[in-house]
Image (spheres, helix red, strand yellow):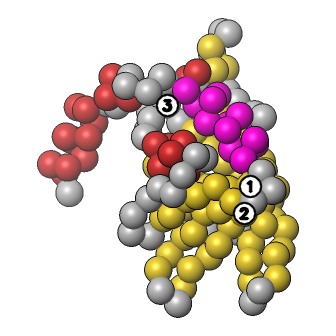
Amino acid sequence: MVGGEVGCRLYWLSVRMTMRLLVVETWHELEVECQYWPEDPYAVLLDFGTGRTEWILSREVLTAGLVGPAGEGDVHVEPADGGRVHVALGRGERVALLSLPADGLDRFLAETRELVPPGAEPGRIDWDLCIRELLSA
């Protein structure tokens, strides 16, 4: 786990996790960096290290997917056999199926909850900045 610190307070979280990607009925291992920034408290970023492929997922959906099916649209998360969690990204013919260790995801999400407890997310958002960005678009 990597995180930036100010004094003794962690202000971001980054964890590299070995995941499996299903390609033509064969699992391939890949390293994915899971990132969490308290300034964007609802989101978890998965960086696939290609410089072009990142997915932003809901922290709440990932948490719910540890215990049962969760998600709508392009992201679905659910527990799988062997202590794993499956994450389906995309729709129809263009779906990437990832398999990751449930205990690793659970530990990562626990760390995000240490940074921003559930229910405290709105207080971490810079609403003035959001409004300025909306008005400048």
Residue at the image point whose x is 67% and y is 38% from the top: 106
Q: Evaluate if marks 3 and 2 touch, with contact meaning CB atoms under 8 Å apart.
A: no
Q: Evaluate if marks 2 and 1 touch, with contact meaning CB atoms under 8 Å apart.
A: yes
* Element marked by disc 1: strand
Region rendered in magenta: 102-113
Residue at the image point whose x is 78% and y is 66% from the top: 20
Few, some or many residues within 10 Å of mark 2 (<14, 14–19, 20+): many
* Element marked by disc 2: strand
Seen in the picture, residue 41 relative to 51 is either above or below; the reply is: above
Residue at the image point whose x is 58% and y is 46% from the top: 67
Seen in the picture, residue 2 relative to 60 is either above or below; the reply is: above
Q: Nearer the viewer, residue 37 or 27?
A: 27
Few, some or many residues within 10 Å of mark 3 (<14, 14–19, 20+): some
Tell me the number on the disc at residue 34: none
Q: Which residue corresponds to mark 3?
A: 38
Q: Amino acid at mark 2?
A: Ser
**Is 77 displayed left or right of 119 in the figure?**
right
Task: Determine which quarter of the picture holds residue 74.
Answer: bottom left
User: Which quadrant would the N terminus be assigned to in this image?
Assistant: top right
Q: Amino acid at mark 3?
A: Pro
Q: Nearer the viewer, residue 83 or 7?
A: 83
Q: What secondary structure prevails in the magenta region?
A: helix
Of the image marks 2 and 1, the number of the one nearer the N terminus: 1
Residue at the image point whose x is 44% and y is 59% from the top: 71
Does residue 84 show up magenta in the picture?
A: no
Q: Which residue corresponds to mark 1?
A: 84
Tell me the number on the disc at residue 99: 2
Could you tell me how far apart the alpha carbons at marks 3 and 2 are, in whole angstroms? 25 Å
Could you tell me how far apart the alpha carbons at marks 2 and 1 are, in whole angstroms? 6 Å
Q: Nearer the viewer, mark 2 or mark 1?
A: 1
Few, some or many residues within 10 Å of mark 1 (<14, 14–19, 20+): some
* Element marked by disc 3: loop
